Image: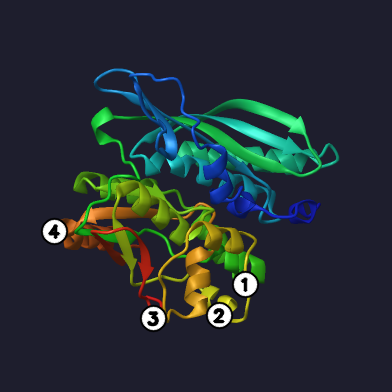
Amino acid sequence: MTSLTSLTVGGGCAAKYSAARLQKLLEGFVPVEAENLLIGLAPADDAAVYKLDDERAIVFTLDFFPPLVDDPAAFGRIAATNALNDVFAMGGAPLLALSIAAFPEELPDETLAAVFSAADEQVRAAGGLLAGGHTIRDDEPKYGLAVVGTVHPDGIWAKSTAQPGDALYLTKPLGTGLVLAAKGDVDEAVAWMTMLNKDAADVVRPFAPSAVTDVTGFGLFGHAHEMAERSGVHIRIDALPPLGDALEHARAGVRTGGDRRNREFAPVDADGVPEELLALGYDAQTAGGLLVALPGDRALSLEAEFARRGLFLARIGVVEAGSGVSVTARAAA
């Protein structure tokens, strides 16, 4: 079987354009004003949201990237998860998906079929339907989804509405990029990357979070930087939960393709923080967890509900008055 990763120079969310370059490219680019465009590029978020009526809005997103694993089914499932999770990060529920696919002609049919089949299974698990798509020939394989979901107009989660006094939570550990780059426990990394954020979002929803985003290619620090800047607050991160042996790989000097770009985009105040923890915070995640800012008086109840359902949850910091992101972690949680 053809090794998918041998056909690409960088896979998963590490293949993203740098956040700083994207920000520059989109400066001043604002869609024509539309009363019902609730979320577009001013400011940008995890997906666009368009209001249909007082009870319904559609959430629309797309995401695709080159392979980060060789198993075609795992690749299809990871790519689908990453795209679907944008809808969950907006508080919505997936409804319909279309494949975006680019593959070399010489790849065996069974390889492509495994990608599509696994993606279809994941879309169904998320509550949606995979209803078609578009495929082109390309020397470098790429796969992902365009996803349409629904959300109540009053239930939209934005990344720009964090408030001082919020507790900050993460619903998956960090380090998928480091583990894959080091060829560590790939099976564990794949298990996390194929975990939909549906269950976590279902638990968070009744607690009315202040702000939510998902952690992907810009790393935890990059997405925290976006949340802090767009909310006009300061975020202090005091714990970084590692995935498996990710910290060991970071200590050994392993770094991923997105590390340098993420550091340039999101400088943090981190005096005295060990370098391996900084590498963990800047590591480009693929299909990462939700980053949730929640009023502090609801924090213990949220923790209890996640524990009751057997779901991962790490309290990683607080939201304060001010600006920027600081890191005070000295040891991983």
Q: What is the C-alpha distance between the residues marked 1 and 4?
A: 39 Å
Q: Amino acid at mark 4?
A: Asp
Compare marks 1 and 4 and give the one earlier in the sequence: 1
Classify mark 1: residues with Cα within 10 Å, few (<14), some (14-19) or many (20+).
some
Q: Choose between 57 and 259: the one closer to the eye.
A: 259
Amino acid type indicated by mark 3: Arg
Please name the amino acid that badge 2 sits on.
Glu
Closer to the eye: label 2 or 3: 3
Labels 2 & 3 near each other (Cβ < 8 A): no
Instruction: Indicate which label's residue lies in the foreground, 1 or 4.
Output: 4
Question: Which residue was labeled with disc 3?
Answer: 330
Closer-to-camera residue (283/92): 283
Q: Earlier in the sequence, mark 1 or mark 3?
A: 1
Which residue is under mark 4?
A: 297
Seen at 61% across and 48% down, the residue is 16
Q: Which residue is mark 1?
A: 184
How packed mark 4 is, by other alpha carbons closer than 10 Å (few <14, some 14-19, many 20 or more), is few
Q: Nearer the viewer, mark 1 or mark 3?
A: 3
Q: Residue 193: where, in percent of width, then height?
A: 52, 55
Question: Cα distance, mark 1 to mark 3?
Answer: 24 Å
Circles 2 and 1, Cβ within 8 Å, touching? The answer is yes
Q: Is residue 314 visible?
A: no
